[in-house]
């Protein structure tokens, strides 16, 4: 449904099956050999894995997919070895170490101090009032609805049967944050991969940022005959959610819930690696706090 949707979308676009690996810069002979080996792909193993996921695993992300008949083989593009692109080996122990891949997230979906993980103050205020959770957004294409995105569908190697994610219903209830923290304590190799750790850390940061959310509003009634407390005490969760959606979509709405959201200001603590957090810590340091 999710990983499978991406695969089906890629097939439907008519994109070619060529995977190109380009070697750029200077290499020693050993480094060039390592790069070629890392670019190799066991196509039979890949097809066997995909077939098992589709036919045997009952993983919901692969239901209804057609097993692949072939797998594209990566092609290496490189210039012939010359004195300009080949270095003499000086320290093989250091030069021949492979440090792995680099994983990054786009900053476009990072929580901000004013609106959290939402597009507007109204959406953030509505979420705080309704105690909803922040979303996990993995950029790279809108192939599936972000609100339905499950961790176990993004990482089938960690959850081969599509079960065990933080949102799974359990007999003993456990919070998403505690579940994610438990994943980080597991010694299984698939849970110690850099890509998985990055996503889990981002999810935990977003949850903690959301938990610090505050709403401030002017203490005046929404009508002349009611106090502020009386005005908001009659609002329902559905009224607040509908008003927030109308404000985000620029639909005229003069209901008490919409008036409350327009008067409200929201704020939350920024994630540690964001510029806003660095600026705040810098002020504390210069203020000797």
Image (cartoon, helix red, strand yellow):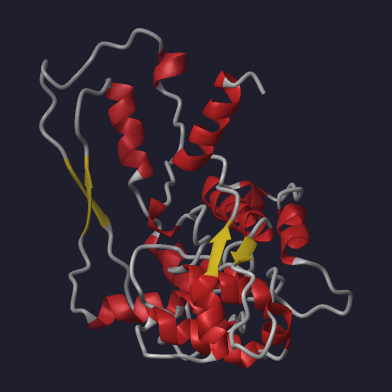
Q: In x, y percent, where is residue 190?
A: 62, 53
| Most distant residue in the top direction | 90
Which quarter of the figure has residue 158? Answer: bottom right
Which of 37 and 209 lies nearest the eye of the viewer? 209
Task: Write the residue at 52% across / 50% down.
Answer: 195
Q: In x, y percent, where is residue 267?
A: 57, 57
Q: Is residue 171 above or below residue 274?
A: below
Task: Write the residue at 44% across / 31% down.
Answer: 98
Q: In x, y percent, where is residue 258?
A: 51, 84
Horizontally, is 37 left or right of 167 in the view?
Answer: left
Task: Write the residue at 44% across / 65% down.
Answer: 46
Q: Answer yes or no: is residue 106 visible.
A: no
Rendered-image quadrant of the C terminus: top right
Which of 244 and 195 lies nearest the eye of the viewer? 244
Q: In x, y percent, where is residue 125?
A: 58, 71
Which of 227 and 280 lies nearest the eye of the viewer? 227
Count of marks overlaid on the render: 0
Q: Is residue 246 above or below residue 196?
A: below
Which quarter of the figure has residue 6? Answer: bottom left
| Most distant residue in the front direction | 224
Q: Answer yes or no: is residue 193 visible.
A: yes
């Amino acid at each position: 449904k999710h990983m499978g949707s991406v695969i089906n979308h890629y097939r439907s676009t008519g994109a070619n099956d060529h995977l190109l690996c380009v070697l750029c810069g200077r290499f020693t002979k050993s480094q060039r050999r390592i790069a070629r080996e890392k670019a190799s792909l066991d196509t039979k193993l890949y097809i066997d894995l995909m077939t098992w996921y589709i036919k045997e695993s009952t993983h919901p992300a692969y239901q209804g997919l057609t097993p692949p008949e072939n797998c594209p083989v990566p092609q290496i593009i490189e210039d012939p070895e010359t004195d300009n692109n080949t270095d003499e080996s000086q320290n093989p122990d250091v030069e021949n170490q492979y440090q792995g891949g680099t994983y990054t997230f786009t900053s476009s979906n990072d929580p901000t101090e004013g609106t959290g993980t939402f597009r507007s103050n109204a959406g953030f205020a509505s979420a705080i009032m309704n105690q909803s959770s922040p979303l996990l957004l993995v950029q790279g294409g809108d192939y599936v609805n972000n609100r339905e995105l499950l961790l176990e569908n993004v990482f089938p190697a960690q959850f081969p049967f599509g079960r065990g994610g933080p949102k799974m219903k359990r007999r003993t209830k456990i919070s998403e944050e505690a579940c994610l923290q438990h994943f980080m304590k597991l010694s299984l190799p698939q849970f110690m991969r850099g890509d998985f750790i990055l996503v889990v850390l981002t999810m935990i940061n977003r949850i903690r940022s959301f938990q610090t959310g505050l709403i401030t509003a002017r203490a005046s009634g929404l009508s002349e005959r009611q106090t502020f407390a009386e005005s908001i005490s009659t609002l329902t969760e559905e009224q607040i959610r509908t008003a927030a959606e109308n404000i985000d979509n620029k639909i005229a709405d003069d209901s008490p819930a919409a008036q409350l959201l327009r008067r409200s200001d929201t704020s939350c603590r920024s994630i540690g690696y964001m510029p806003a957090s660095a600026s705040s810590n810098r002020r504390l340091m210069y203020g000797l706090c």
